[in-house]
Amino acid sequence: MNAYAELTGSGTPTRQAAALTGVPRATAVRAAARATGPDPEPARPRPAPANKLTNAERARVLMVLNSEEFVDKPPLQVYAILLERGQYVASVATMYRVLRENAQVRERRRLATHPARKVPELIATAPRQVYSWDITKLPGPARGVYYDAYVMIDIFSRYIVGAVVHATEDGALATEMMTSAFGVHGTPQVVHSDGGPSMTSKTVRTLLADLGVVRSRSRPRVSNDNPYSEALFKTMKYLPEFPDRFTSLAHARQFLDEFAHAYNHHRHTGIGMHTPADVHYGLADRIDHDRDAALDAARRAHPERFTSTTRPKILDRDPAAWINPPPADELQLAA
């Protein structure tokens, strides 16, 4: 700005001075006007409003709002209640202003506090230790009509041990599905689910308690606490052949039966490219031995084609499956 002033003072046109210094002419004109203009008048103190409450009156407003009767009520309710009794302490805005001055603008109701939900930590080192189950909606033949698919999966083997479809969600139907699954595949040590009404129903709780099965629950609104069931439902609903709507309950049951059979016999990357059926029924170790033998024979025949003597990682199986990884020392024990 000083360079601009020196140039224009020596007779340089303002347009040329602006181009040389990069200072816009309008900015320079405003700066010169401020420099030569009179000093601004100091701000006058604002007079206190004539209707301002005295300190004693403000203290009374705060005392009323914090009284045992009104301590958990918002100012609007306090204002209305006092007017019904023929009393006027202050306007609603003034009540809020007094509360704000005393750092009391907050939720005034007495609210229950709940301890943080415990993170479920489950680990399975073999089949039939931990089952996870859930219910998902299947679209029916008309808008607003849905069928309920009850599906239970072994988290270690990824084997679907129970899958049925009913027209409604009910704890008794869930108990029937569990009883059938346990009778065929064995009673697990733990059954995990979310907190839905069927999962927490008395019939389900009674069945698991009678069998000595530990119940485990997901935290509210935490889908990662039930990953195996959620992933299973996503796999099912993203199939190309998953219909927009099921024409009948029989159609839904047929589809789920076919899906469960195909799922139990497909090769799963999470279990070393074995099928859930192979792992669930103890055939995976023999298959791994056959795979290793075939790889060894290929290495001996063509050693130049292999850079490693170990099994490819895609064929490895984890020694344990878990819901929320437990501490490292427990994983080491599982291994």
Image: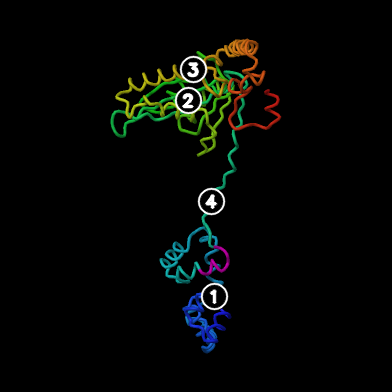
Residue 17 is one of the magenta-drawn residues: no
Residue identifier under label 1: 21
Q: Which residues are magenta?
A: 97-104
- Main SS class of the magenta portion in the image: helix
Q: Compute the Cα span from label 4 to label 2.
A: 32 Å
Residue type marked 4: Leu
Residue identifier under label 3: 181
Q: Nearer the viewer, mark 2 or mark 3?
A: 3
Check whether the beta carbons of the residues at disc 3 and disc 4 lie within 8 A of each other: no
Residue 101: which numbered mark, if any? none
Residue identifier under label 4: 111
Residue type marked 1: Thr
Check whether the beta carbons of the residues at disc 2 and disc 3 lie within 8 A of each other: no
Q: Earlier in the sequence, mark 2 or mark 3?
A: 3
Residue type marked 2: Thr
Residue 173 placement, left or right of 123 = left
Residue 203: which numbered mark, if any? 2
Q: Earlier in the sequence, mark 3 or mark 4?
A: 4
Q: Earlier in the sequence, mark 4 or mark 2?
A: 4
Secondary structure, mark 1, is helix
Viewer-nearest residue: 161 or 179: 161
Q: Compute the Cα span from label 2 to label 3.
A: 16 Å
List x then y, in percent, for residue 280: 55, 16
Secondary structure, mark 3, is helix
List x then y, in percent, for residue 39: 54, 88
